[in-house]
Amino acid sequence: MSALGVVASGPAADAIALRVPELVGERFASRLFEQDATLWGPDAESEASIRLSWVGLPRSSRPLVGEVAALREHLRSEGVDRVVLCGMGGSSLAPEVICATAGVPLVVLDSSQPDMVRSAMVDLDRTVVVVSSKSGSTVETDSQRRAFEAAFTAAGIDPTTRIVIVTDPGSPLDKESRQAGYRVVNADPHVGGRYSALTAFGLVPSGLAGADVEALLDDAEAVSDVLAADDEANPALRLGAAMAGTSPLRDKLVLVDDGSGIAGLPDWTEQLIAESTGKNGTGILPVVVQEEEEWEVEWPPRDVTVLRLKGEGEDPDSPDELVQPDRSDIEVTGSLGAQLLLWEVATAVAGRLLGINPFDQPDVESAKKAARGLLEQKGGAAQAPAFTDGAVEVRALGNGWLGDASTLVEAVDALLDQLGPTGYVAVMAYLDRLADAPLADTRPKLAALVERPVAFGWGPRFLHSTGQFHKGGPDIGVYLQITAEPHQDLEVPGRDFTFGEFIAAQAAGDAQVLAEIGRPVLRLHLTEHDAGLQQVVAVLSRHSR
């Protein structure tokens, strides 16, 4: 049996002691596994009633194991051994973690950045593409699909033999793809995207890439009864209470991998928690850090809980060993399959404690709508930069906070001056997250500079994750957006916009929505990529202001 462990100290432990008995008395766990849609109040009931099938996935997803294995063998027999996944949010993040942990290659394309899209369209003679979209109308995924269809056709390859569609039954993509002769695998329509790790969205690309998805389901099924138990030892009740039951609420959850052996789990956890809880002016902001020595872990302020992911089979520290003055700490252990289900249940618990609906994402749609509007206007009248410093154009959105800043350093400092005592900084980089990966190294340096939590997100990937919290959560953030012209733009076949125009509209729409609700946004546009990026990295990596 795959063991799970949740140990806490400080306010997180106090929250467990206070809130878990309440949850047990309410029979929260057993009612959740009975798919009781009333657990989050009347406003959430209609959405919850069609979003709870994920509790039974360790058993109900079993038929996919054989289907995926047969398809994989068929493709391998034809020399097709490279898997590309086109998907956004939960559709891409879960398979990325599953495959990285299993040590099998998977190319994840969850971007509309044209250079990144182009870099995925190689080795087509040995490539199968999984197109994952629950609704079938996600513009990023539709655009990626069109690009691969055209590329396969140009290479003399029938795209219907190399593209596998994963979508909900009856979606526009489902109907269109079946009519065109594509292989379609339907996912459970009663599971939301970020809870879909153990549906076809997680299992099809992972299984095709070579991960053992049956073992994943085995691990999850082994802990299902434990997580469904109305028992104070239930690790999901403990984790949910520790995250969302502190008083006052510690609304930043710093996630650090401490030898878990699960590659990238904090990134998947980040989107699950942020998109599920960040709404109605509340929520939990996950902050992913890479090292134990980073500022948020060593010197966490009073609104932060630090959560360490430990190795499976490793005994968590005792509460006495964790205790430090003013600190709130959690340690979690368990295998990947077990933790996927653990975190989903714990996030549902957190939604209950916060009094929100953990299954909707209203502010994700607001950014999509703004981007669509800008695309229809072909960008409209672009906002003129406040000034240009070297290879960086500077624009400020919000309530006149830029002041008389006239250099890049002064503009960044003016934004950081808006940071309150419980605030956070969000760096939102609409760049190529593979080629420009070193930019993320500025995150811990900026956190040490401002002595506040710093969230770093690659656009448009983060729009399906922390993007919900930035707009729907508490008004305490300041937002630094970085954009650039692509090295080479790319047409979207059958559309009247390019990938470059699309990602520009997504960035502008995101900034527009934030500014409209009074949140300060600093937009830095790199007019010359390498030189501009070097300038930005230097400013964000300073040791003092």
Image (cartoon, grey):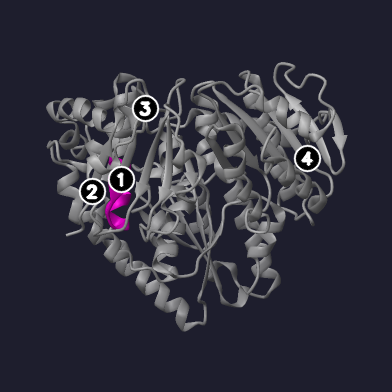
Residue that carries the numbered disc 3 in the rendered image: 357
Q: CA distance from mark 1 to mark 4?
A: 40 Å
Q: What amino acid is found at the position of numbered circle 2 in the picture?
A: Gly
Q: CA distance from mark 3 to mark 4?
A: 36 Å
Residue that carries the numbered disc 1 in the rendered image: 331
Q: What amino acid is found at the position of numbered circle 4 in the picture?
A: His
Which residue is pictured at 57% across the width and 42% down the height? 456
Residue that carries the numbered disc 2 in the rendered image: 5
Q: Quadrant of residue 58?
A: bottom left
Which residue is pictured at 78% across the width and 29% down the height? 410
Q: Which mark is residue 525?
A: 4
Which mark is first along the chain, 3 or 2?
A: 2
Are the residues flagged by discs 2 and 1 in contact, CB closer than 8 Å? yes
Quarter of the N terminus within the rendering: bottom left
Q: CA distance from mark 4 to mark 2?
A: 45 Å
Which mark is first along the chain, 2 or 4?
A: 2
Image vertical order of residue 9 relative to residue 159, above or below: above
